[in-house]
Amino acid sequence: MANTTPASITPLHDQLEQLAAFEPVDLPVLSLYLDLTADQHGRDRYDQFVRKTLAERMKSLPPRSPELESFERDATKIRDYLGTLDPSINGLALFACAGAGDFFEAIPLEAPVDQHWLFVGAVPHIYPLARLVDQYPRYAAVVLDTNAARIFVFGLSRVERATEITNEKTRRGQMGGWSQNRYQRHVDHMRSQHVKEVVDTLGQLVTTEQIAHIIIAGDEVVVPMVRQQLPKPLAEKVIDTIKLDRGADESTVLQATLELLRTKDATTDAEVVEELITQWRSGGLGVAGPEATLQALTMGQVDQLVIAGTPATLKRVQKLPEGSAPGDVQVDTSAPQGTVDPERVKLADELVTRAEQTAARIRFIENSELLADLGGVGALLRFRI
């Protein structure tokens, strides 16, 4: 019998869509990303960064201006919110513009954020958030034996939903003759029914939650049984199988399955880039380089944006297309010096924002060498004009 713990968070994809739809304003929009993991002494490391960067940015604004007033109100809200943080979270993405209808959106994250970042521009800066979604994707993990199973939906390094299935425990008997054969048939039937219930529950969950990837963890007895009963649509979503004790705790399951997912992802990154290059060079459904990709996004042609995992590898453009967010993007970070180019930062965010606005999938390529000859970005297209 199945027992489900329901999802308790708003799908981040919906929040990304809302942020991407934000209309540019003349007032400063703050996008704050914080790494909330403690240092080796157990102390938070973000407070000094927040105090310093907010104070310095406020000093750069004209006295008694609407920009300064909006920024000051945002800074107060941010400091108040940080005082209420749950100490168990590892990261935070926060967006604010008091002068734009008191806009304030805070997204606590189980997944860690890479360094501290403050972006100030005309729209929310969503590139780092979209990359986190790609690094910590939503997927289902099934951990089972011949009479019990747990099905998890993981996303952004946390459990979104958990379902437990428990059936009658069976074991091979020591009887002989017809009794032994009859009992073994009973055991096989009970195990088959258990696996069928797991597969049916998994299928319903995958459909309801729109899951694209599945990992199965079990022993050499039950995994082949699951494989045999999986319908084709589910079988095509299985990334791989691993051996894992059914009693493993949630963190162990998450760590093992996420590591497997990333190993597979590195391989498929290369395959996606290879397909992109083939389509581009043959004049097919592919474009390469920032200018061509921006144009395709503007036309709504892009099915999948393929972009470098760091803006530093993007080729600069002479001019962003019409309709891009106005003004520069100001950047403060705890990352090492020399790693930030505001022009490339703005370009990266423009590409990702347009992809979100046109419902294009986004694929971040962590190995920057794969996209080096393409200017750091390209796209697979829905159609050609």
Image (cartoon, rainbow, N blue to C red):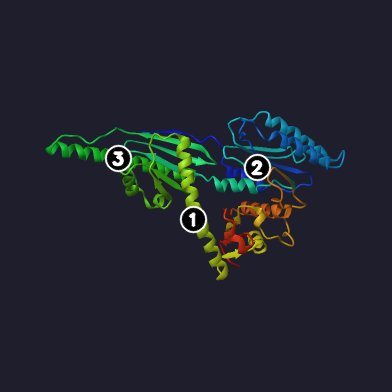
The mark nearer the N terminus, 3 or 1, is 3
Q: In what element is the residue under mark 2?
A: loop
Position of the N terminus, as image quadrant, is top left
Q: Nearer the viewer, mark 3 or mark 1?
A: 1
Q: Nearer the viewer, mark 2 or mark 3?
A: 2
Question: Relative to residue 106, is residue 73 drawn left or right?
Answer: right
Give, as a three-letter code, the residue at label 3.
Gln
Give, as a three-letter code, the residue at label 2.
Gln
Q: In what element is the residue under mark 1?
A: helix
Look at the image and tell me whether residue 273 can be seen. Answer: yes
Q: Residues within 10 Å of mark 1 (few under 14, many from 20)?
A: few
Residue 230, compared with residue 303, is above or below; it is above
Residue at which label 1 appears:
267
Residue at which label 2 appears:
115
Of all residues shown, which one is farthest toward the bottom? 282
Question: Relative to residue 283, is residue 350 drawn left or right?
Answer: right
Picture coordinates of residue 285, whole percent (x, y): 56, 65
Identify which residue is drawn at 68% across, 60% down: 315
The mark nearer the N terminus, 2 or 3, is 2
Look at the image and tell me whether residue 70 can be seen. Answer: no
Residue 196: image quadrant is top left
Q: In whole angstroms, how far apart are the C-alphas of marks 1 and 2?
A: 27 Å
Picture coordinates of residue 4, whole percent (x, y): 44, 34
The mark nearer the N terminus, 1 or 2, is 2
Residue at which label 3 appears:
193
